[in-house]
Amino acid sequence: MNSKLEKIEKNTATLEIEVSEEQFEKGIQKAYKKNVGRFNIPGFRKGKAPRVIIERYYGEGVFYEDAINEVCPEAYQAAVDQHKLHPVDRPEIDIVQLEKGKPFIFKAIVTVKPEVVLGDYKGIRVEKKEYPVTDEDVDKELENMRNANARMVAVEGRPAEKDDMVIIDYKGFVGEEQFEGGTAENQPLVLGSGHFIEGFEDQLIGAKAGDSVEVKVTFPDDYHAEHLAGKEAVFKVDVKEIKEKELPDLDDEFAKDVSEFETLEDLKKDIRKKLEER
């Protein structure tokens, strides 16, 4: 794992983290073992299909989402420790590179603890407030777990919609010239995530796999790359694949997959207990 601290601005740190091809492959293999029981492949008993067959049937990126969930937390924590940061919330993750045969690269944007000079705080009394845990709180945590364990499944016969993931190749031009950093292949992008420049993702909604789309955008005046700031650009985009999120069923099998518990009811009790201890 390699990482670099790009900047700290207004208590916000941006880390670029690179996970080696070998380490990401281990994440894919873990994702396969974790999810193989969910696939029904003609000619194979449920849970017995080889990984290569599943990837051929659903697309080579079928396990990428779960692999990211496997490798990101450890890589992120290692980067935080390396740069001696003190995060105060969860990071915003932005995928930079996700291609077969290459390292997995992502950015983590996180709020860090500011430097604080304490005044005279002795003798100040603070009332501790109790916040009861509701069924809705437990359900929200379960839904977060479902989303974290969802997989992206290729869809056919319909155009891309908001919240779909599209796999795209693109080249960016200002005038007639390609610009540095404006080219990628097999780039995954969740439409509506806001990870790309404003207006880019909206123009891919309605496209179908196999379509070529010209996306026209204007870089903001304060864009970090000064040679692009305020300029109009055209991206020539090839939509290679469209995927939608498939959530696992909320049942006892789900509880076994994501925890040490045998039943969904026991998992709910554990979630409630942990929420009450916060």
Image (spheres, rainbow, N blue to C red):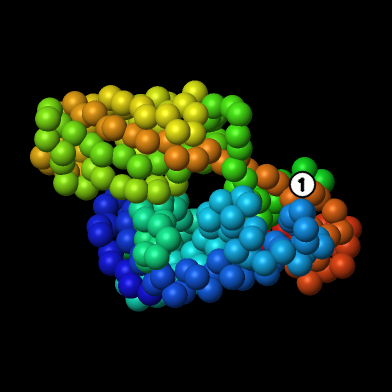
Q: In this view, does 6 lie above or below 160?
A: below
What secondary structure is found at the residue carrying circle 1?
helix
**Is 226 or 68 nearer to us in this picture?**
68
In the figure, residue 20 lies in which quadrant? bottom left
The residue shown at (53%, 56%) is: 60
User: Looking at the picture, how far across and down is residue 150, in whole percent?
Assistant: 65, 51
The residue shown at (27%, 27%) is: 217
Q: Would residue 167 be seen by someone viewing this image from the given angle?
A: yes
Picture quarter with the N terminus? bottom left
Q: Would residue 273 be seen by someone viewing this image from the given angle?
A: no
**Is 43 or 188 nearer to us in this picture?**
43
Q: Which amino acid does label 1 sit on?
A: Asp
The residue shown at (40%, 57%) is: 99
User: Looking at the picture, how far across and down is residue 127, in whole percent?
Assistant: 64, 54
In the figure, residue 159 lies in which quadrant? top right
Q: In this view, does 26 lie above or below 42?
A: below
Q: In this view, does 158 lie above or below 22?
A: above
Q: Is residue 136 above or below residue 110?
A: above
The residue shown at (53%, 73%) is: 26
- Identify the residue under disc 1: 139
User: Looking at the picture, how far across and down is residue 85, in whole percent?
Assistant: 37, 68
User: Looking at the picture, how far across and down is residue 264, in whole percent?
Assistant: 86, 58
What crowding class fits label 1: few (fewer than 14 Cα within 10 Å), some (14-19), or many (20 or more)? some
Left or right of 39 in this view: 32: left
Picture quarter with the C terminus? bottom right
